[in-house]
Image: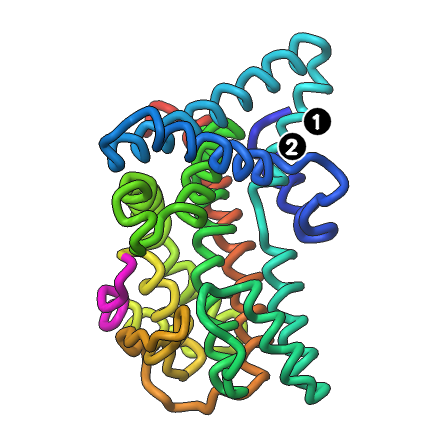
Amino acid sequence: MTLETQILIALLLDLVFGDPRWMPHPVRLIGRLIAALEGPARRAIRDTRLAGTLTALAVILTAAVATGAALGVAGWLHPLLGDAVSILLLYTTLAARDLADHSRAVWTALESGDFASARRLVSRLVGRDTERLTEPEVVRATVESVAENTVDGIIAPLFFAALGGPVAAMAYKAASTLDSMIGYRNERYIDFGRTAAMIDDGLCWLPARIAVPILAVAAAVTGRKAADAWRIARRDGRKHISPNAGIAEAAFAGALGIRLGGVMERSGEPVNLPTLGDPLEPLVRGQILAANRMMFAATGIAAAIFLAVRRGIAVFPEIW
């Protein structure tokens, strides 16, 4: 079975079933490994940044080697088992259905007037204080999460899967998990997590920029503003503290005609982020569903492009 077919099946499994919670999920295992290594690394190495660097490299290398070993053993036992394991591993690196389910749950709570539940549900998507958020702020936080994770949880894993199969995709997920756990600019992780954050930023740099034309087309397909998605991504994408997240958020803001970013709270302290987009439309709950439609369209477009390019390289290698 070709890798292109494996990726397509994995994507369909994700879209239909979502996160496979019934199995020992590799990302959760990666998270446990990070937590297990942090303490010993800090104690053994006095230089905090070096300790974090070695932890990050060890986690990424372990994820890649373990994935390669699993594929090798499965393929040795039977080629069909090797295909099945490859599909299963690729499936666990994708998050389109879960992203849609979590964000739609916020919309459902808002639609029913249950603002307490909406604030609680959105807290699972973002790293800010949510207890006092107004409805527009809940919508803003949810759309920002959908935008950022369209790249981090879908387009980037598809890109690395097409580039290097399950090993590359899982190595990327290890880097992404490291960033989500230790890549913070707070007192505890400013040094220990710096390398992890830099690795994640580096790996996501190209997928985030490839995402701009993909999101513009997705906007057009879903009846949104394709030209504004492109324009605002170019105008505001670099304003964000993250070199990558701001690009996707700006593209979504332009496509939906809304303003993202601005003031939020973390640990009770106000944080001023740059604003992205123009407030042409209000931040109403329907924007969550519109963002989800864009996300699904972008998923299909990205998969089609990456798999077509990979197939073209395989069929006509002399051109490349």
Is the magenta region chiefly helix, strand or loop? helix
Identified by mark 1, the residue type is: Ala
Q: Nearer the viewer, residue 118 or 18?
A: 118
Identified by mark 2, the residue type is: Ile
Q: Quadrant of residue 234?
A: bottom left
Tell me the residue at 50%/40% (across/down). 307
Mark 1 secondary-structure assignment: helix
Tell me the quarter of the image containing the C terminus: top left
The answer to whether the residue labelled 1 contacts the one labelled 2, judged by CB atoms less than 8 Å apart, is yes
Tell me the residue at 59%/40% (across/down). 28
Left/right of residue 318 with respect to residue 70 in the rendered view: left
Q: Please give the label number shown on residue 312.
A: none
Tell me the quarter of the image containing the N terminus: top right
Which residues, given as a range, are shown in magenta? 234-242
Q: Please give the label number shown on residue 87.
A: 2
Picture coordinates of residue 237, whole percent (x, y): 27, 66
The answer to whether 133 is drawn above or below residue 217 in the figure is below
Picture coordinates of residue 84, whole percent (x, y): 70, 26
Left/right of residue 33 with respect to residue 226 in the rendered view: right
Q: Nearer the viewer, residue 266 or 20?
A: 266
Picture coordinates of residue 312, whole percent (x, y): 44, 34
Dot 1 alpha-carbon crowd within 10 angstroms: few under 14, some 14 to 19, many 20 or more: some
Tell me the residue at 27%/49% (across/down). 190
CA gap, disc 1 to disc 2? 5 Å
Q: How is the image coloured?
A: rainbow
Mark 2 secondary-structure assignment: helix
Q: Nearer the viewer, residue 24 or 282?
A: 24
Is residue 161 visible in the rendered structure shown here?
no
In the rendered image, which residue does mark 1 sit on? 84
Is residue 145 visible in the rendered structure shown here?
yes
Residue sitting farthest toward the right: 22
